[in-house]
Amino acid sequence: MRLLEVMFDSMFVDEPISSSYRSGFVAMIGRPNVGKSTLVNYLVGEKVAITSPVAQTTRTRLRAILTTSNAQVVIVDTPGIHKPHHLLGERLVKSARSAIGEVDIVLLLLEACHPPGRGDSFIVQLLKNQTKPVLVALNKSDLVSEAEYLERENSYRNLFGDSVWPIYRCSAFNGEGCQELVRSLVSLLPLGPQLYPPEMVSDQPDKVVIGELIREQILSQTKEEVPHSVAVMIDRIEEITSGNKIKKGKSNTAILATILVERKSQKGILIGKGGAMLKKIGQASRLQIQEMINGPVYLELFVKVVPNWRSKPARLSELGYEVN
């Protein structure tokens, strides 16, 4: 059972959903690297979004689903809002901004460990021009003292000006404040039935999730050397059996994937001396994928140089980076 299900005592039984049940969508908005995906993973109790110390890790609008006994909260994890420098960046920012108009509530995620910056000011002004209810989560509260936290909270309240948005102290690392935050989100959702089956925690197809897990390991292993100019295409996923004999529970999942980079030097970094780096990425990715599908995996990775792929509309569309 997922963590917040335990918190909210949501043991599912075969009973009709009550007329007081609530359901709806919440857009999680914020600058890059403020911990949106980490908080999403904590709230649903499972890893549904990749995380990395590298900014702008999230590229797709992922819907994470938290189902409790009295509500279903669909959290839309959006790319960080930033100043774009290429077509991919423009599409990511447009995707995040368009999500605001498609949800019931906006959750603005800020950092308690940093004072307000120009990026925060831009997002605040953006949210002031819309009519959806806004809740604010001041994340990473575990990294600051009580005095520092209060100073940050006051600074952000001054930034909000006339907008009276409630601020919730929280930590995606240790869960501080998350229960209260979810209760408040639920109270603002409209009455309605479950939108997804209760066992679902994400609406992402397996192919997309697998590609993201591989990209997460690339970011983790290469650090700042190949930060944003990498993408992963899943070429094929198929079930294979040894000796052409189907043995129940013994089939392997074979996955072929292509890693796209923009320069030959980046390809060299990803492959590494004697293929060591690519092997390391593959092994770490395979372990993550095996945990996800609960079965053995054969993973083969290729690296391909596609100059300036982040600025090519056709290539971005092929990779699924569309503005929804």
Image: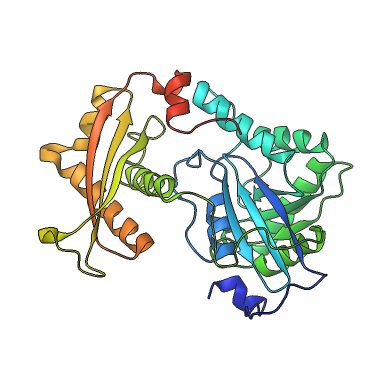
**Farthest residue in the front direction?**
245
Q: Nearer the viewer, residue 295 or 217?
A: 295
**Farthest residue in the right direction?**
162
The residue located at (29%, 59%) in the rendering is 287
Give the number of callouts.
0
261 versus 73 height, above or below: above
- Which quarter of the rendering shows the C terminus? top right
- Percent of width and height locating residue 178: 65, 65
The residue located at (56%, 73%) in the rendering is 3
Locate residue 32: give its quadrant: top right
The residue located at (50%, 32%) in the rendering is 321
Locate residue 288: give its quadrant: bottom left
The residue located at (35%, 36%) in the rendering is 233
Is residue 117 at all visible to an observer of this figure?
Answer: no
Q: Nearer the viewer, residue 321 or 172?
A: 321
- Percent of width and height locating residue 281: 26, 47
266 versus 284 height, above or below: above
303 versus 202 height, above or below: above
- Percent of width and height locating residue 47: 47, 59
Q: Nearer the viewer, residue 246 or 270?
A: 246
- Percent of width and height locating residue 263: 29, 22
209 versus 59 height, above or below: below
In-image side of 175 versus 168 (left or right): left
